[in-house]
Image (tube, helix red, strand yellow):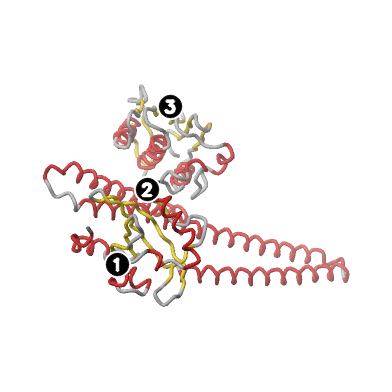
């Protein structure tokens, strides 16, 4: 089947730097790219028609069959080996760590699995080096802390008049400890960020690759509907990736103080109309947005784009985290000094234990981990609103829905 489409698959497979291996339902390798061949040390001829086990260490063979059968039964794209380390076996017998993403395919009635493989040997080595450096640093800090503590006690015994100097040394020690704590938190944040970027970019890119491959199959005029479906998939995923990049740029501007707000006078209805128009294209079957009443006379002297960003984030979240046949209510109220925007949904809600962290960067509520997202949007919205003298708050109950409220000054002073 794959041999009849060599030109198409060569273009697709060789376009990515990750290793690409396609197997049939019997775990027989039917297609590879140069990256995978180089990674495992085989020629294409050495891999084709071979059982997948030649790329898996023998110690993993016993459990691999059941994992493969389970995946073929469920047929859902996912990251392989979640919660445990994965390893591959090269032709020369060497073992190396890897990451693998599984994507089910069905072509001409036959089932296949496309696996994207990444050699993470360098990353693992760097993680080990970082762990060793952190251990060494902690030991040095511990030794230095002990030295300072001994010195403080000696100074107390020798001369009580030096209490002030001892106090300064203790304060210096606390500053060092706080600095080390912040450095550790920063390292953890960087690690979480890299993991997030890897996952949130890899999944859409895999979808784009799959849709592109399937798109080439539909060449007849009567197959235009199927072509349109895959074109929409590609467009949606590219749009999603673009939004992620825009969020990262916003974070950088906020942290470096390079964010310049453009204050103008505008109609609230103009922004709401734009937000609702764009959100309507995201609605699931049976979902509906209730437009706010009597807002034609409301005006603000604010940053129009920031208000649109905030409302779009909340309305899109309400749609994303709600099921079909639900309603998203938008309510706007204005008094002499402030304007209030309330977005109410009937979605999955936020668990009580997660509510205190919902505005933290990269945080995802436990019941939303399987829904696509980065955990950045609400953090960015909150930062922008506070910079403009506004606030954002919410009330939520799991499995019943959430109400988010934005409070903005009618005029920024």
Residue 74, image x, y percentages: 40, 46
Residue at 46% in and 43% down: 378
* x then y, percent, for residue 216: 19, 53
Q: List x then y, in percent, for residue 38.
A: 34, 73
Q: CA distance from mark 2 to mark 1?
A: 23 Å
Q: Secondary structure at mark 1?
A: loop
Residue 259 can be seen in this image: no
Marks 2 and 1: which is nearer the front? 1
Mark 1 highlights which residue? 48
Give residue 18's quadrant in the image.
Answer: bottom left
If you read the primary sequence from the N terminus, does the residue marked by circle 1 or circle 3 appear first? 1
Q: Is residue 310 left or right of residue 349?
A: left
Whether 353 is drawn above or below 198: the answer is: above
- Comparing labels 1 and 3, the label whose residue is closer to the camera: 1
Image height of 349 relative to 95, above or below = above
Foreground mark, 3 or 2, reads 2
Residue 279 picture quarter:
top left
Q: Is residue 225 left or right of residue 258?
A: left
15 sits to left or right of 149:
left
Give the labeled residue for mark 2.
75
- Residue at the image position 22 percent from the left and 63 percent from the top: 11
Q: Tell me if I can see residue 305 in this picture.
A: yes
Secondary structure of the residue carrying numbered label 2: loop
Q: Quadrant of the C terminus?
A: top left
């Amino acid at each position: 089947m794959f041999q009849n489409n060599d030109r198409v698959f060569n273009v697709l497979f060789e376009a990515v730097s990750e290793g690409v291996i396609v197997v049939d339902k019997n775990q027989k390798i039917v297609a590879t790219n140069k990256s995978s061949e180089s990674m495992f040390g085989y020629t294409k001829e050495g891999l084709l028609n071979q059982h997948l086990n030649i790329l898996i260490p023998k110690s993993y063979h016993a459990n691999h069959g059941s994992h493969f059968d389970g995946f073929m039964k469920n047929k859902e794209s996912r990251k392989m080996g979640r919660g445990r380390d994965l390893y591959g076996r090269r032709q020369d017998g060497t073992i190396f760590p890897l990451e693998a993403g599984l994507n089910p395919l069905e072509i001409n009635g036959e089932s296949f699995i496309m696996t994207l493989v990444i050699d993470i040997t360098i990353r693992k080595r760097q993680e080990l080096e970082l762990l060793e450096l952190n251990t060494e640093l902690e030991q040095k800090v511990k030794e230095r802390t002990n030295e300072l503590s001994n010195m403080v006690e000696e100074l107390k015994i020798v001369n009580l008049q030096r209490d002030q100097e001892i106090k300064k040394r203790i304060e210096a020690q606390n500053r060092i400890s706080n600095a080390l704590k912040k450095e550790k938190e920063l390292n953890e944040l960087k690690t979480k960020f890299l993991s997030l970027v890897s996952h949130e970019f890899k999944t859409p890119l895999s979808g784009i690759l799959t849709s592109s491959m399937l798109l080439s199959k539909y060449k007849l005029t009567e197959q235009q509907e199927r072509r349109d479906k895959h074109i929409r998939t590609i467009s949606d995923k590219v749009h999603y990736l673009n939004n992620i990049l825009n969020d990262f740029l916003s974070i950088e501007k906020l942290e470096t103080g390079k964010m310049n707000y453009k204050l103008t006078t505008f109609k609230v209805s103009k922004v709401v109309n734009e937000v609702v128009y764009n959100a309507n294209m995201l609605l699931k079957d049976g979902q509906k947005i209730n437009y706010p009443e009597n807002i034609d006379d409301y005006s603000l002297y604010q940053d129009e784009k920031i208000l649109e960003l905030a409302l779009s984030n909340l309305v899109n979240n309400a749609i994303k985290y709600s099921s079909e046949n639900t309603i998203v209510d938008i309510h706007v109220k204005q008094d002499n000094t402030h304007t209030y925007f309330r977005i109410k949904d009937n979605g999955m809600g936020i668990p009580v234990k997660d509510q205190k962290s919902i505005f933290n960067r990269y945080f995802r509520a436990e019941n939303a981990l399987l829904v696509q997202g980065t955990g950045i949007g609400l953090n960015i919205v909150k930062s922008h609103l506070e910079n403009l003298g506004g606030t954002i708050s919410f009330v939520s109950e799991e499995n019943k829905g959430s109400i988010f409220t934005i409070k903005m000054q009618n005029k920024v002073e």
